[in-house]
Amino acid sequence: MKHLLEVDPKLVSIILPVYNGEKFLDQSIQSCLEQTYVNIELIIVDDCSTDNSYKIAREFQKKDKRVVLIQNTENKQLPASLNIGHKVAKGSYLTWTSDDNFYEPNAIERMVVEIEKSGIDITYSNFNIIEENGGFKRKFVFNEGSTILLGNTVGACFLYKKEVFDRNNGYDEELHTVEDYDFWLQASIHSHFNHIPDYLYNFRIHKNSLSYHLNQKHSSSKVDFNSRLIKSYSKFFRKLEFSKERGYSQLFSKLHQHRRIDVFSFFKNYSSFEKDMKRIYRTAININSESNVTDIDLRLRGNIETYKKNQNIRTLIEILKNRPVVLMGYSRSRGFRIILKCLF
């Protein structure tokens, strides 16, 4: 495979959107240009920054002909900047990164090898979570049992074929803050994913990052995230031609965020839900039925255990009638604790 990459190395386009990211931009750009896989183009899209971001990017462009620099005349936000970068990209394989994060030197090469070897459409890896000063915080390992229908299983380090972007018609510019998850969710209908267990990326946590604000319980970003997540699920179910959605967009949005659902009502309609899920498994080629069923079961268990309104006898009866494995099919000791909470 190494020989194949040397004989016919496909061009990889890395899109780097930046808005007032001068603090960490230098390191982010360097990590792209210092990849062991050298056949890349780095497309930096400056989203009308008011700091020195454009100036920093311009200096790199002067030194390296692989750098393409675009400056938006007005602030368009992340999904629009991603589309602008992707539309000028010439690569067979595409990815994007953030101005506050950085790659490991072999990241692009490792992901290209994976796609070339396996023939899949999208590959993604584990990554390190780092402090604002660059110090190591912890490793982020993806749970192989998790599914894209209930959360972003792709994360921050990925590579995909150009056809994936084309089939998705790009990133949804109305879904800022969920544009990445929406992209993967829609792609799960038509594209094959594969996980690399290596740590190829460094994801920085700091108070100015979007991910930090999304994790603040009462932030406006969190409210926007919720409404846009519902829209993303609505789009997904429309693409699968569900004539009756049965409230699935709201349901999956709540399960995705571990928010309370009415477990009693859910199991009252479980036969219809089960039938509709089988339809999804037949149609969406990257949603594994076994993993997804398990993921839903475990989220339901957590919902009952966490929220007192779901702890009652009538809910317990509906679970035992429709899917007793939710209580007894996994950790039995935990299942018994849930039963006791429902009884007393």
Image (spheres, rainbow, N blue to C red):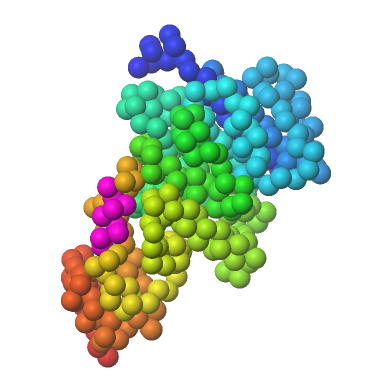
Query: Which percent across, then down, holds residue 132?
Result: 62, 49
Q: Residue at x 19, y 76 (%)?
A: 320
In the image, residue 198 sits, relative to residue 253, either above or below, namely above
Q: Nearer the viewer, residue 229 or 329?
A: 229
| Residue at the farthest top position | 7
Query: Which percent across, then down, holds residue 226?
Result: 54, 63
Query: Which percent across, then down, holds residue 28?
Result: 62, 35
Direction from residue 97 to residue 167 in the image, left or right: left
Predominant secondary structure, magenta span: helix
Q: Residue at x 49, y 45 (%)?
A: 183
Direction from residue 335 to residue 118 in the image, left or right: right
In this view of the protein, can residue 145 be seen by the observer? Answer: no
In the image, residue 273 sits, relative to residue 26, either above or below, namely below
Q: Residue at x 68, y 17 (%)?
A: 65
Direction from residue 74 to residue 246 in the image, left or right: left
Q: On the rendered image, what quadrant is the N terminus found in?
A: top left
Magenta region, residue range: 274-282
